[in-house]
Amino acid sequence: MAVPPRERAPEPVLESAPAPEPEPVRPAAPESSSQENCPACGTVEMRTVLHGSDRLYHTTDKDFLVVQCAKCGLMRLYPWPSPAEIGRYYPDDYWFTPEQDPSGKWAERYRRFVLSDHVRFVWRAFQDSRENGPVLDVGCGGGLLLRMMAERGARVIGLDFALAAAVRANEVNGVPAVCGSLGSRPLREGSCAVVTMFHVLEHLYDPAGYLDEAHRILKPNGRLVIQVPNASCWQFLLFGEHWNGVDIPRHLLHFRESDIRALLEDCGFEIVRAKHFSWRDNPAGLATTLAPSLDPMARRICGVHETPRMKVWKDLVYFGLVLASLPFTMAEALCRQGSTIMLEARKRP
């Protein structure tokens, strides 16, 4: 459960009413499947990189392309699904939900272990900010990361588009969470010490709009922490459309490190730190690339029928694949080509 602030209580951070949206300063991302122009530079010319369908959750048989802008090199899903369509590609319980059995308890212990490097990264950003505001996690899911931050002494707030996720964060992990979108400007200007977005930006039609809003709600020395799949990693080169980080059709954008750095700088941020390895995401991502049918969350979401013995056996085989993936994923991260990129940034002076 969240602990009280270490100093005086801050002013309320929730807005009493939504503020008007700012005028866009970059090419707008149209919310339709007729997306022709690059959302970063507006160029029409593109080349096809790969094609594929929903390999993990099998929500659709529809085939999509991944194309690359001929000018700036940004890769994106093509065509973009409309907002009405894309909702069908997100299964219920699209976040970590341990089952209430012995294997579920072990899964939560494992989840805490692999989340520890995320927590350390965010905690250092929080301390370096020297600000007294809360940590806001955009796309908080079930809220376990925020619970771990609260256990260290930070005040926390969760925000998730899924009502069930916000309810779970509140009821199970004791995290104050709100169902909503950062684009609706739910917090006051200059109210947060840290804003985190773990695997959020690649799902958005307009990630620059979210980053602009993070810039607005951060305190003067506040920190932004983001993580996205890295489309310049070795795994993408080796596996193409089978790489777990592509996640067709839920990932609308596929950032290389240079792309995400340019986006942050364009939104008024200065990058402080970079991390190319994640205990939670890199080894497990490779294991899921190699054997998507063994991924525990995909099996749960897809409702795969299995006996308790079969479930344990599949979990053990998957965990063995995760362990076997460690040397390769550590090697690519040491070469700054890890399958994820985590960045800490602050407002540019």
Image (tube, grey):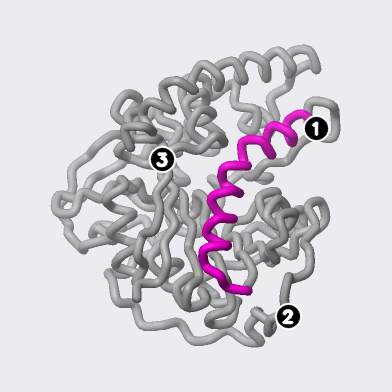
Question: Of 297 and 325, which appears nearest the observer?
Answer: 325
Image point (55%, 55%), residue name: 124
Question: Of 96 and 79, which appears nearest the observer?
Answer: 96
What is the x, y in percent for residue 250?
A: 47, 46
Give the label, 2 or 1, closer to the camera. Answer: 2
Residue to which mark 3 is pinned: 276
Give the label, 3 or 1, closer to the camera. Answer: 3
Label 3 Cα neighbours within 10 Å, binned few <14 / some 14-19 / many ≥20:
many
Count of labels shown?
3
- Quadrant hosting residue 279: top right
Q: Which mark is residue 270?
A: none
Residue 280, compared with residue 12, is above or below; it is: above
What is the x, y in percent for residue 10?
A: 69, 81
First reached walking from the N terminus: tag 3 or tag 1: 1
Image point (50%, 70%), residue name: 222
First reached walking from the N terminus: tag 2 or tag 3: 2
First reached walking from the N terminus: tag 2 or tag 1: 2
Q: Do the residues labelled 2 and 3 touch (CB within 8 Å)?
A: no
Residue type at mark 3 is His
Q: What element carries label 3?
A: loop
Image point (61%, 31%), residue name: 298
Instruction: Look at the image and tell me whether residue 78 can be seen.
Output: no
Q: How far apart are marks 2 and 1 (CA)?
A: 37 Å
Q: What element carries label 2?
A: loop
Check the picture and name the quadrant holding the N terminus.
Answer: bottom right
Q: Residue 8 carries which label?
A: 2
Residue to which mark 1 is pinned: 105
Q: Main secondary structure of the magenta part?
A: helix
Magenta stretch: give its range: 106-132
Q: Distance between the residues labelled 2 and 3?
A: 36 Å
Residue 267 relative to residue 14: left or right: left
